[in-house]
Structure formats: C-alpha cells, structure tokens
Image: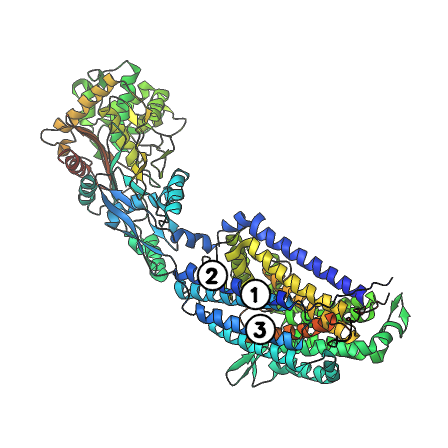
Amino acid sequence: MNKPLRHVWLVVGVLFVLLFTSTTYFQVVAQSRLSAHGQNQRTLYNEYGRHRGPIVVDGHPIASSQESDDTYGYLRSYDPGAMYAPITGYYSVVYGFTGIERSLNDTLSGEADSLFYHRLADVLSGRENQGASVELTLDADAQQAAWDALDGKRGAAVALDPETGAILAMVSAPSYDPNELASHDTGAVSRAWSELNDDPERPLTNRAIGGDLYPPGSAFKLITASAALETGDYTADSVIPGPGTYELPNSSSVMNNFSGGRQEPCGPDDESTLADALRQSCNTSFGMLGVAVGEDQLRSTAEEFGFGQDLSIPMGVTPSRIGEDLDDAQLATTSIGQYETRVTPLQMAMVAGAFANDGVVMQPQLVGAVRTSDLSTVSELSPKELGQPLTAANAAQMRQMMVGVVEDGTGTAAAIDGVEVGGKTGTAEWGEDRAPHSWFVGYGQTDEQKIAVAVVVEEGGYGSRTAAPIARDVMEAVIHS
Amino acid sequence: MATIVSYTARPRRLLQALLLLFAVAVGVGAYALVGLGRFEELPANLLELGVGALVLVLVLQIAVMWRAPYADPVILPVVVLLNLLGVAMIESVHAANSIFGLRGSASADRQMLWSVVGVALCVALVVLLRDHRRLRRYTWISAVVGGVLLLMPLLPVIGDSRNGSKIWINIAGFSFQPAELAKIAFAVFFAGYLVSRRDTLALAGPKVLGIHLPRWSDFGPILVAWGFAMAVLVFQTDLGTSLMFFGLFVVMLYVATDRLSWLVIGAVMFLPPAIFAATQMSHVRTRITCWLDPLSSANYGSCEQISQGLFGLASGGLIGTGLGEGRPDMVPHAESDFIFSSFAEEMGMVGAFALLLLYLVLVQRAIRAAVGISDGFGTLLAGGLGFVMALQVFVVVGGVTRVIPLTGLTLPFLAAGGSSLVCNWIIAGILVRLSDAARRPAARQVDGAGPAPAPRPAQEVRS
C-alpha cells in the first residue's frame, strides 16, 4: 500500500504549497493594499494608538491628546474648542479628521518623513514615540477679539501679518465644539454629527477659506483702483467720471451710484478724483474705471493678488475668482465686486496686506513651527512672496486713499487713535430681498507692527456699520499688545 | 517494483526528551512574551504553566519509554509545541480583549486544563493499548459509536445550535463537538472494514467504461458513509465536517485498493450535495460569496470575519507585530476558528510558515508510520489519521486565506476548544502507538542472547 501512500503524501504536499502561497500572497504581496483598505479599522486604530502631538497657539495647547483606557489609546481634546475649531478641525474616531488635524496628520502623529530621525532616536532610547507639536502663527488675543466681535454672527474674520503672511486670526462663525466629535462615545458623536450637518447655519464650514465664497461688493474697488494705478494712466488725484447713474454698455440695466437706489453723482460736474471716488465708494466711477482699464489688466492684477490660485495654508483654500469672458456691462459690475466676482475673506486680507507691504503679497501661512516632543525644531515659518500686483509707489498711493476712507469716508468706524488705519467697506448685494453682506477690508500699521484684516458678516447690512468695528477690534488687539 | 523500507531499531528516546524540553522552552517562552507584550510584565501563572508543562512532558516521556520505546521521537514534541503555542495565542487574544474590550474570549486557563485532560488520555492510551491491532476488533462498534456521535447534535435536548451549525451537544453544562470523536471512531472503522474488503473492492465487480465498479455488497457501507456525510451537511449545515469525513473515507479507500477509480467515484458522489449546498443553503451561499469577494462594500457586513482575518494577515506582514503586540481581538473567533490569522498577525509570514511546517512534519511522521507498519490495518489507520489532519489544516487555513470557502473546522492542537484538543491528543496517542509498531524490531532482543536480529523489512509493497 506504499504507492497510494506516496500519492497521498504528494496530495498533502500540493495542499500545503497552496497554503504557503496564499499566506505569502496576503501577508506580503497584497499587504499594502489590504492595510490601506477603507474598511480596515486596524489602520485607524493604529492611528489612534499614537500619542499625537499638540497644536499650540502662543504656548497654549489648543488641541492635545490624553491617554484613555479604551480601544483608541488616546482622547483628543480641544481647549478652547469652538473658537479654534475651523482651524484645528476635529479628530473623530467615526468621521475621520479635518483642518490642521488632517493637513498635518503625518506631523502630529509622528509619521512624517521629516521626523524619521526623531522616531529612530525614540526607538533607540526606548521612549514612547510622540508626534510633533505644531505651533500656529495665530495671535491668541487677535483670535479672541475677532471671536468676541463677531459674537456668533454668521461670518468670518481673517488677520494677517502683511510682511510674513503669518495668519494672526482666523475666525469662522458660528462654530462648533470639536470635543463633541472627538469623543469616544460613538453614539453621542453621530448624534452631534447629524445635528451639526442639519444646522442651517452650517457651523462645520470654515467661512474664512473654504466652501463659501462671497461677493466682495465695494471692497473689490481696491483691486479695480490698483489695476488702474498699474496701467500708469491714473494716480490717486486723477479726475474720473462719476455720474449719478451709469447706463451699462449694450444693456438696458442702469447702475446707481450708491446702493439703495441713491443717484447722487460722485462730485460736481459728475466727476471726482480717484481718491474721492474710493472714499465715497462711488459705483459709477469704478464701473466706468473698470471698463476703461479693461478686463485683461483687471484680471492680471487680481491674479497677482492671488485670485485663481490654489493655496494651502496648509488647509486648502478655495480660489477666489472674477468671471470669464466679460462684456463691458459685466466688466462694469465686476469692477464694483458684483456679477460673478467671488472671494474668500482670506483673499481680501491678502489684498489689504499687499498695500501695507509695498505692493507684495505674501503667501498666507498658519504653521509657525513644528517641534518634536523634545522641543528640537523640525521646521519654521519661512515667508514666501506670492506676487506683486502693484509697485511700492502705487501701494503708497493706495494706502493714502484707504486712509482717506477711514478718516473721512465709509470706514470711520475702523479708526484707531494713534494708528494709521486704511480700509474699504463693502456692502455686497447677493440676492433678492436679502440683506447684503457686510465687508471691511483694510490694514493698520504703526512703526513696529502691521496688520491686514478682512471681515465679512453675512447679511450684516452696511459694511461701515457692521464689519468695520469688528476689524477695528482685531487690529487693536494685535497693535496694542 | 518493490520498495524495501527498513529501519534500524533505535529508540531515540534521548532525542525525544531533548525535543520535548525544547518544545516546552519555546512554548512557555511564547506565553511569557505574550504577557510582556500586553501588560509589560511576566504573566502571574508563568511558573505554574512552566512546571505544569514540564510535569506533563515528563509523564509523556516516561509513558513512551515504558510502553512504546520505539515510538517516533518527533511526534510528541511537535504536538506539545503546538499545544503550548495555542495556549499562548489564546492568552494573547484574551488579554487583548480585556484591554480593548471589543469582544470577550475565554482565558487560556481552560485550554490548559483541557491540555492536562488530553495528555492524560494520550498517556492512558499508550499505556493501555499495547497493540494497535486490538482496535480492529472494534471495527463495527466504532461504526455505530461514530454514527451515534455524529448524529447526536441533531437530538432535541442535548443538541445545540451555534452560528448556524448544529455541531454541538450540551450535557450538564459541558458542551462538546462530537464530530471530533466521531472522526477517530470512523477512522478505526474504515481501517478495519477496508482491510478486510480491499481485495474484493479492488477486483470483484463489473468493469464499466474502464472503471472497476464495486459489487453492491461492498458498495453498501460506502453508501452509508456517504449518507452520513450528507446528513451532516444537510442537517447540521456543516460543510467542513462532511468534507473531512468524506475525504478521510475516500483516501483510505484509495490507499486500501490503489484504484484511482475510487477517487473518481468519491469526487462524483460529493459533487451533487456540494452543489446543492452551494445553491440552496443560504448559510453556505454566504460563505461562498465571502470566499470570492469579501472586501467589496456590499459584502463587507456579512463577511466581516474573513475580511478582518485578511486585515490581520496584512497587519502581520513578513515578520509580524510580535507576540502580544498585535490586535487579533479585532477578528471574531480569533482564538478558535481564526487562530491562524492571529498567529500570522503576531508572528508574521515567518511564524505562519513555521506553524504550517510543524503540521507538515506531523503529517509526514504519520504517513511514515503508515509506510513502516507491517499490517494493513495499522497502515490504513496511520495514513488515514495523517491525511485527515492535513486535510483539516488545509480546510481551516485555506478558509482563512481564501483558498477555499470558510468552514467551521478548527486547527488541531492549536485552536481553543476542549473537544478538539482532547480528541487530537487521543489521535497523537494512537500515532505514537502506531509509530512504535512501525519502528519496533520484529523480535525483542533478549538480554545476553547474542546479537540483535536484523531488522525485518517493514512491508513488501503491492505493485
């Protein structure tokens, strides 16, 4: 009976070869595919098992991990939560993560390539591997001031250091408590999640950079004016036409000089200087100026300011835009920030920053430094130029005009004693029977400190009344600290 | 062609002792590593386990030296090592469950207890069963016992349905999978029956289309075996057990008759019920779906176990996470049905291969004994038991690694479960007894009576 036994042994051999093959396949060949599989909670749990680094503002951790005695190993908590939530994002065991938690996940979890030697040192010294800490550029006072000033009104405020691009404040309201989503009580998390998603005020949206683009209204006149100066044909003192109404070219529509249907001309003889037109925020002046300057110049200036660019701060910023293939009527309304012009508050803060930084736009950045758990620095903020929409001389003229707006125009509510404040208000119409969005875009500077701000309050009415005081509070918090 | 297989009659008891000590050292070391990995301290009962294991291997060593001095020196060390590794892995899963709380699983204490029972039965068998041929007397009794055991889970009071399969009985709080014991009984029955009928099975009967068909009188018992396998499949919805029984029977038939026609007949007879099960039984259909495509989002919910097992395999990679460092608790039944994926996760592909090789060595030793043994009954029994162990490993590991659909069998000696462990220790005892018979010189050397007789050729081969 030995021959059949040998055959049996052969069969056994074949069966085991199959097992060796399949084991090799799943453990080696298909390993990375399986580990990356969406349903593989093991990968998620590994993620949660790491001691994540904190997110720090002015030395205070606004997001940090504490050990928890459950599956996830660590609980992420946020303090204060809502004020910084649009920046930190949340770190949920159910719904994944957003904001800095997502953009800098590798750094916070300690898995980034740049942390390789740190990880190695941890392994060699037997320390528990802890992720790196991310220090943000935010100024806690400015953030608090912006948060308090917005006071839960729907809108956003962004403040920049014009010289470095460092973001000093970024508030989006209404916000949410990320602790509710970071909780390990999955039932409570999913209830909080559906509540936040069903909220008509959409608290999960970061209005400062994402999703929502706003018509900038009159605040866009800053860009139209810059484009005009850049042509070389205009100065702040150039006299430009500004009638009470402007019949749009090749169109039956009529542009009134002021919102609310007011039709006073911009000055005697239906004309005024460019500076005066900006101070009063005359619509017809800028509509006609935009048509005179032309779409190409307007677009190239806007793009130098950062329009149409994909920015990452490191979260992605929705690119701001002006419409395409504009005829003269559309160009006129575009020039006063209507038609298809849509911007983020961050973009408008960058515009204001360019004037305070001699015409140079710096790339906005949120991360000041990345440090390992033993406080050695992995990377630090390095300012980068993004573009130069206008010359230093033209930037100076723009500042001069914007100071006029704040001293003696629509932006008086933004004035601060002893500080040079320039700006532009906006009252952006955006729908029938809806109150317009309220804007203020401007800068403040002393010899030591510069700041650029943009504030939008949804359906806030006149920019001069609603947005300008908020901007003032934010600038004050930075300059007086 | 005739092959002469001969053995020099060396007991090699010292080798077995050293291998047993090595197995205990590795197994207890694995248990210690699990404690260090999970809690960063040595397990509290490490000393008890170590001493207990040493006592058990001492008893095994003495029993073998006393009653089966020529037994294969490798069988028991492999079995002891598998058993201890299983204990370590069950403890790893249990500790992970108590830390992370995803689900619950029994601690390894129970498995240790069952190991003691298993070793005791193995020793008793080696000591009491002096000659395996005595089992042949119980051929028909074994058939009845096996049949009763197999059908017991279908009885109303003691039968117990779990996870869609009725393969458990429950008596006075103790649950038991009688199929494991039935496996031994049937192996004995098949061996006894086939050894007496092999010539008539092979030669008598009409020849149709080049295939020798058996006579009806010989074919009857085969039909009964087939019927039993189908009963298990249909009424207990247990594809694995029925496949195991039928595989055991067909292979023993083939070994006994050396006729490929039997393999063909066996395969043909298993096909219709397998097709019936695959198309008509939702339980089996789900398993087939999960076998073909467990990871798509549509199937994920129903195939969680196999997907989690695959993720565990992937998590282990080449060298594994380390004992007590992985997350086998994420796989349902990680300590029993899916203990292979737990091993592969914590010890990697290297460890999984080592495990498979241990089984291969064990099967090889059984078949080696089958070749060496001088009577047909012993050959059939050893070959059958060896093959059924290989088949069981294939069905389990193949199910976990998607070679075949998943079935409800467990890895011998490794998986948590008293009935399986105890029954496999009995099989180990039978294999020890059979290998002793295979390697024993034909006549005992009498003290001072000249040189030992030359070892007798084990078995002349039919060709």
Residue hosting label 3: B421
Q: Amino acid at mark 2?
A: Met
Asked if the residue at tag 3 contacts the one at tag 1, i.e. Cβ–Cβ closer than 8 Å, the answer is no
Q: As drawn, which residue projects farthest toward the left?
A: A417
- Which chain does tag 2 point to? B
Query: Could you tell me how far apart the alpha carbons at marks 2 and 3 are, in whole angstroms?
Result: 24 Å
Q: Are marks 2 and 3 in contact (CB under 8 Å)?
A: no
Mark 2 sits on what residue? B330
Chain letter of mark 1 equals B
Q: Which residue shows up at 67% across the image and 83% down it?
A: B145
Q: Quadrant of the N terminus of chain B?
A: bottom right
In front of the other: A355 or B158: B158
Q: Which of the two residues, B232 or A397, is positioned nearer the viewer here?
A: B232
Give the distance between the C-alpha atoms of the residues marked 1 and 2, in whole angstroms: 26 Å
- B202 vs B338, left or right, is right
- The quadrant of the rendering that contains the C terminus of chain B is bottom right
Decide: is B440 above or below A216: below
Estimate the x, y position of residue B421 in percent, counting from the top left: 57, 73
What separation in Å lies between label 1 and label 3 (alpha carbons)?
13 Å
Q: Please rate how many residues cluster around mark 1, counting C-alpha atoms within 10 Å: few if below 14, some from 14 to 19, many from 20.
A: many
Q: Which residue, as the protein is rendered here, is positioned at the far top?
A: A233
Q: Which mark is residue A472?
A: none
Instruction: Tell me the number on the disc at residue B81.
Output: 1
Count up the numbered dots: 3
- Which of the two discs, 2 and 3, sits closer to the camera? 3
Mark 3 closeness class: few <14, some 14–19, many ≥20 residues within 10 Å: many
